[in-house]
Image (tube, rainbow, N blue to C red):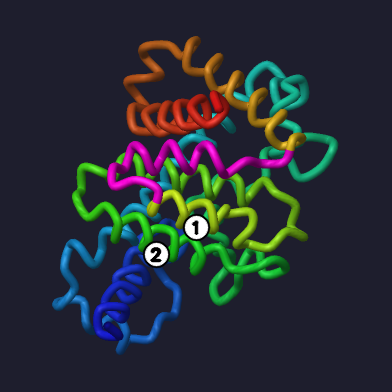
């Protein structure tokens, strides 16, 4: 069991190193030396976590570019919560990078050290889902869960515990609710409920994402296919969540 856990953790470290801004992190060389014995199945939880983080980065990079036109950053109500200060000069850097969504700051530091460690907790969630649903056909649904968990965690008050803002209890319980990933996804959406003020903001945010997707030009869509696919995944996940 410890050997398997070691393989999973090593795979996670290796995938994190592939994220932009993490290439030069100092990781124990002995940990990375075992890469030849790590299977694709070992890498699956880590790959899905990093996929979710990259999709959030893609989505918010689109949002950043859109918000900088026509003074939208100052006029769109939903964007205020994404800025560092009341002047709304720019969307906070923490929303623009995959590593930041995972709570990783500069080398050797944790972005959210005041209220917990996101990387470890989200890894536990991914392990629970991939263990329960080992077939890769479940990957899409699992990524949607991870995206929402990371979104909620980065929007909640820093005084809340990381396990609480990631809805870890609800995440693990959802995997036990149904043998079908769609049923587990439904359970998570139904039970992982944010506070009323955040729910109110999420409704405004989902409406904003819908407007962006409805008005994007075909030329811009062609130039940024992957980013808009990520934005669509985020919007669709929020739409489903808010339907409960």
Can you say whether 27 is above or below 116 in the image? Answer: below
What percent of the width, then of the height, locates residue 207?
A: 60, 19
Can you say whether 79 is above or below 17 in the image? Answer: above
- The image quarter in which residue 117 lies: bottom right
Residue 209 disc label: none
**Residue holding disc 2:** 16
Quadrant where the image shows the C terminus: top right
- The image quarter in which residue 130 lies: bottom left
Residue drawn at x 44%, y 80% is 26
Which residues are the magenta region? Answer: 177-195
- The image quarter in which residue 232 lies: top left
Cβ atoms under marks 2 and 1 closer than 8 Å: yes
Q: Residues within 10 Å of mark 1 (few under 14, many from 20)?
A: many
Q: Residues within 10 Å of mark 2 (few under 14, many from 20)?
A: many
Residue 192 lies left or right of residue 70; in this view the side is left
Can you say whether 42 is above or below 169 in the image? Answer: below
**Residue holding disc 1:** 99
Residue 131 lies left or right of residue 157; in this view the side is left
Q: Nearer the viewer, residue 108 or 1?
A: 1
Residue 115 magenta-drawn? Answer: no
**Label 1's element?**
helix
Quadrant where the image shows the N terminus: bottom left
Q: CA distance from mark 2 to mark 1?
A: 8 Å
Q: Main secondary structure of the magenta part?
A: helix
Residue 188 magenta-drawn? Answer: yes
Q: Nearer the viewer, residue 11 or 137?
A: 137
């Amino acid at each position: 069991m410890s050997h398997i856990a070691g393989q999973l953790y090593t795979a996670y470290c290796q995938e994190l190193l592939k994220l932009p801004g993490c290439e030069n992190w100092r990781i124990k060389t002995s940990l990375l030396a075992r890469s030849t014995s790590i299977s694709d199945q070992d890498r699956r939880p880590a790959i899905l976590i990093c996929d979710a983080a990259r999709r959030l980065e893609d989505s918010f990079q689109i949002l950043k570019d859109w918000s900088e036109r026509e003074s939208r950053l100052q006029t769109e109500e939903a964007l205020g919560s994404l800025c560092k200060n009341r002047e709304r000069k720019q969307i906070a850097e923490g929303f623009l990078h995959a590593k930041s969504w995972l709570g990783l700051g500069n080398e050797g530091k944790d972005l959210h050290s005041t209220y917990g460690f996101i990387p470890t907790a989200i890894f536990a969630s991914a392990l629970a889902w991939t263990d329960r649903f080992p077939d890769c056909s479940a990957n899409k649904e699992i990524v949607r869960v991870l995206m929402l968990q990371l979104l909620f965690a980065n929007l909640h008050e820093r005084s809340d515990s990381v396990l609480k803002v990631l809805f870890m209890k609800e995440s693990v319980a959802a995997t036990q609710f149904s043998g079908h990933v769609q049923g587990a996804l439904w359970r998570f959406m139904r039970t992982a409920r944010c506070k009323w003020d955040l729910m109110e903001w999420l409704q405004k945010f989902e409406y904003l994402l819908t407007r962006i997707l409805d008005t994007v030009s075909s030329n811009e869509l062609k130039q940024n296919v992957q980013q808009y696919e990520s934005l669509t995944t985020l919007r669709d996940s929020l739409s489903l969540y808010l339907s409960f």
